[in-house]
Image (cartoon, helix red, strand yellow):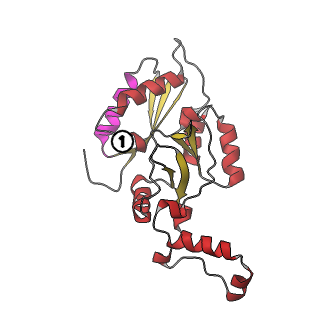
Amino acid sequence: MKARSVMTSPVISVGPDTPISEIAALLIERRISGVPVVDGGGRLVGIVSEGDLLRRAEIATEPRRPHWLELLTDRSIQAADFVRSHGLTAADVMTRDVVTADPETDLAQIAETLERRCIKRVPIVENGTPVGIVSRANLLHGLVAGRHAPVAGGVSDDAIRDALNEELRDEGWIDLTRMNIVVTDGVVHLWGIVKSDEQARALEVAARNVAGVQRVENHLAPDLFTNDSG
């Protein structure tokens, strides 16, 4: 199975000048643990994760070393720690050396990268532009869905997924950045957060209407942070 089969797309991203407070609010609202940082041309320049926001002066969690250790710590490291704990924008705190993959990368390779680098997500990039995210959760979605394979009738799983995403892209009642669609052997697995039972049913109907779909598995979860029934 490839990255494109399980990645979350489109990508939620921020700019280098986005305030730290806005990024923190975005992570909470979207229930995500990290967000890519893109420049004015949409090219990936960094990533901000929950870990980048843990050591902050505002909540008195900035790094504090014993005096003797401060004397032994390189001043450039101390300066970098200060910027990370006091910086005001994404550019101040983001990780610049981002581990990425392309849409055709095998999930086995991504899983090995996540484990080896001790990271939770990998941006999927084409021509320098993020087109998706594969997180640990996405890998579990792929595990639940099973092995990727073409389905009877000549319609591939990727074609079904692309067709459903295209069908939903302009629908105002659903936010695709909170969805992940995985298709295996013609079975559509719907993952993500919905605000109402009506949204869940509409997603199932949309999936069943795509040519080649054999069955729809609903793994959707209610949005517990809103009372909006729209």
207 drawn magenta: yes
**Is residue 55 visible in the rendered structure shown here?**
no
Amino acid, disc 1: Asp
Between residue 58 and residue 96, name the one nearer to us.
Answer: 96
Q: Residue furthest right?
A: 72
From the top left corner, tell me how far across and down residue 83 is, in percent. 55, 71
Q: Which residue is mark 1?
A: 175
- Left or right of 199, for residue 53: right
Q: Quadrant of residue 140?
A: top right
* Residue drawn at point x = 55 percent, y = 53 percent: 46
Between residue 101 and residue 126, name the one nearer to us.
Answer: 126
Crowd band around label 1 with a 10 angstrom C-alpha radius: few (<14), some (14–19), many (20+):
some
Magenta stretch secondary structure, dominant: helix
Q: Quadrant of residue 226?
A: bottom left
Q: Is residue 29 above or below residue 105?
A: below
Q: Is residue 61 above or below residue 183?
A: below
Q: Which quadrant, please, contains the C terminus?
A: top left
Q: Is residue 99 above or below residue 162?
A: below
User: Element type at marker 1?
Assistant: loop
Q: Quadrant of residue 19?
A: bottom left
- Left or right of 96, for residue 40: left
- Left or right of 95, for residue 66: right
Q: Which quadrant, please, contains the N terminus?
A: top right
From the top left corner, tell me how far across and down residue 225 is, in percent. 34, 56
* Residue drawn at point x = 47 percent, y = 56 percent: 16
- Left or right of 183, for residue 197: left
* Residue drawn at point x = 62 percent, y = 44 percent: 100
**Is residue 40 visible in the rendered structure shown here?**
yes
From the top left corner, tell me how far across and down residue 101 is, in percent. 62, 40
From the top left corner, tell me how far across and down residue 104 is, in percent. 62, 31
- Tell me which segment is drawn in magenta: 195-209
* Residue drawn at point x = 44 percent, y = 52 percent: 14
